[in-house]
């Protein structure tokens, strides 16, 4: 029974910590008029330019129709562009534009602030250990999706 209790507590702590980090980041991002939907799209594209719209929706765990509306808005603002896929003309690949760079700099600074607040009081070794343990948990769980 003690193992079940500690497992439940771990799940609760992981969920709560992730929720609080998102909420903290969202609060900071709103001050720069960056909603979660906007910054998440830009954040993923900054790491993986040229994703197909369906791939981007999957990475974001978002319905393709909702992503389409978000991309329409970002495209109107000149922050992203859809380019036809060279191999499959039915598909578009999504790219950030140069106009998105200032917003990405803001997002990076906000992420650094949020991370610093979340990890305050932890040593470099503790942060490395936490990262390794969370990576192992992620790998354990990602096997279910394949």
Image: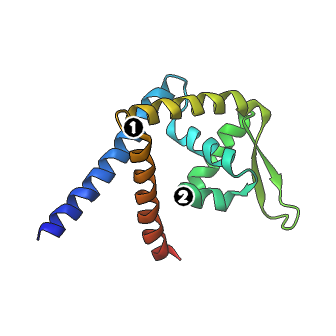
Residue at 56% of width from left, 28% of height from top? 109
Residue at the image point whose x is 47% and y is 60% from the top = 135
Kindly indicate the quadrant of the structure image that contains residue 8.
bottom left
At horizontal 12% and vertical 67% (from top left) the residue drawn is 2
Q: Which secondary structure, mark 2?
A: loop
Rendered-image quadrant of the N terminus = bottom left
Judging by the rendered image, the residue that carries numbered circle 1 is 119
Instruction: Please identify the residue farthest to the right as the structure is shown.
Output: 86
As measured in the structure, the alpha-carbon distance from the residue carrying label 1 to the one carrying label 2 is 32 Å
> Disc 1 on helix, strand or loop?
loop
The mark lying in front, picked from 1 and 2, is 1
**41 horizontally vs 85: left or right:** left
Callout 1–callout 2 Cβ contact below 8 Å:
no
The residue depicted at 58 percent of the width and 61 percent of the height is 58
The dot on residue 63 is: 2
Percent x, y for residue 115? 45, 36
Q: Position of residue 78 (x, y in %)?
A: 75, 33
């Amino acid at each position: 029974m003690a193992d079940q209790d500690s497992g439940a507590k771990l799940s609760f702590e992981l969920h709560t910590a992730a929720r609080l980090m998102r909420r903290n980041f969202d609060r900071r991002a709103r001050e720069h008029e960056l909603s979660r939907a906007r910054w998440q799209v830009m954040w993923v594209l900054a790491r993986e330019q040229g994703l197909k719209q369906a791939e981007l929706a999957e990475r974001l765990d978002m319905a393709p129709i909702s992503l389409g509306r978000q991309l329409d808005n970002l495209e109107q603002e000149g922050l992203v562009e859809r380019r036809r896929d060279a191999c499959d003309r039915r598909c578009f690949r999504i790219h950030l534009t140069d106009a998105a760079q200032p917003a990405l700099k803001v997002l990076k600074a906000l992420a650094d602030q949020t991370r610093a607040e979340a990890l305050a009081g932890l040593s470099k070794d503790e942060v490395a250990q936490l990262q390794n343990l969370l990576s192992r948990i992620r790998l354990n769980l990602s096997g279910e999706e394949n």
